[in-house]
Image: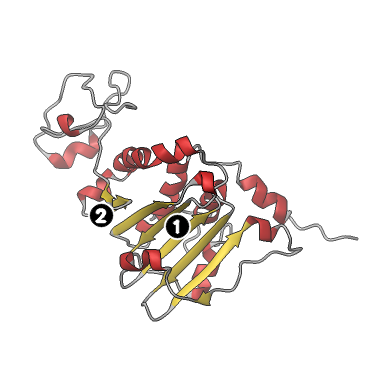
Amino acid sequence: MSSASIVHPHRFVQATRESGYRDIASAVSELIDNSLQAGATDIDILLTGDPDNGDATIAVVDNGSGMTPSILRASLRFGGSDRFNDRQGLGRFGMGLPNSSLSQSRRVEVYSWRGHSAVWHTYLDIDQLASIDEPEIPIPLRIRIPKLYRQLAMATGTIVIWNRLDRITQRMWQLLPRRLHRRLGQTYRYYFWKGTTIRVNGEVVKAMEAVIRTRGTLNRLPCAQEFFHPVLVEDAGTIPRLVADHRRTSAALRDC
């Protein structure tokens, strides 16, 4: 009788490309979640190349705690997190890194280090996996950090690079920096207020609050329009509990 693995590896990987992420910004957010869970306070997103030339790449560089070779290899497995079902962080099941990466690219590379003397690297390549009967994550090898990212690398950290972005058009690529600023500014505003820094091609992402604003901030928000009468809150600590009644309140941010 032939073997019947619970998962068909090649079809499973292809199927994951069609699930879960409505756009690139959502997929990038998964990588940022991982960085924050690793204790990162400084995160750079670099968009390089040109999709028309086939060399566009997206890289996320952080100063998190870094990974050992065994953890690095496991991080690219579906469900391979060392924090599986951990409810204390942003992710629970170890699906974010491989799932988000392969949803947008045909090859993802990961570099990680806990000291510049030992940088480890491994990858997932859809086309390579399709040619192997029993695919496995390649064993991590020691390697130098790519020259493009060396000046961003701190004492510890991780770099995730998406290559062969086969689902992005030139128009999407041109709009991506602005969309990332808007999406990340809203999603991670509480982290920004606590001192975390995220940059897109060197430009710092600023906190954007889509419902609640502090004094004087509305005029600094692009595309913002006040919809309902303002409510003055003297105690800033109560703001997280004052998510406005969305039956009467519209988001202040709109597409430009």
Asked if disc 1 and disc 2 are in contact, CB closer than 8 Å, the reply is no
Residue lying at the far right of the rendered structure: 1
Badge count: 2
Q: In the depicted view, which residue is nearer to us: 83 or 115?
A: 115
Q: Quadrant of the N terminus?
A: bottom right
Write down the quadrant of residue 235 in the picture.
top left
Residue 120 appears in the rendering: yes
Q: Amino acid at mark 2?
A: Thr
Q: Is residue 44 left or right of residue 10?
A: left
Q: In the depicted view, which residue is nearer to us: 37 or 168?
A: 168
Q: In the depicted view, which residue is nearer to us: 128 or 47?
A: 47
| Residue beneath the point at 15% across and 29% down | 219
Where is mark 2, residue-wise? 196
Q: Amino acid at mark 1?
A: Asp
**Above or below, 175 relative to 59:** above
Q: In the depicted view, which residue is nearer to us: 166 or 111?
A: 166
Cα gap from disc 1 to disc 2, whole angstroms:
22 Å
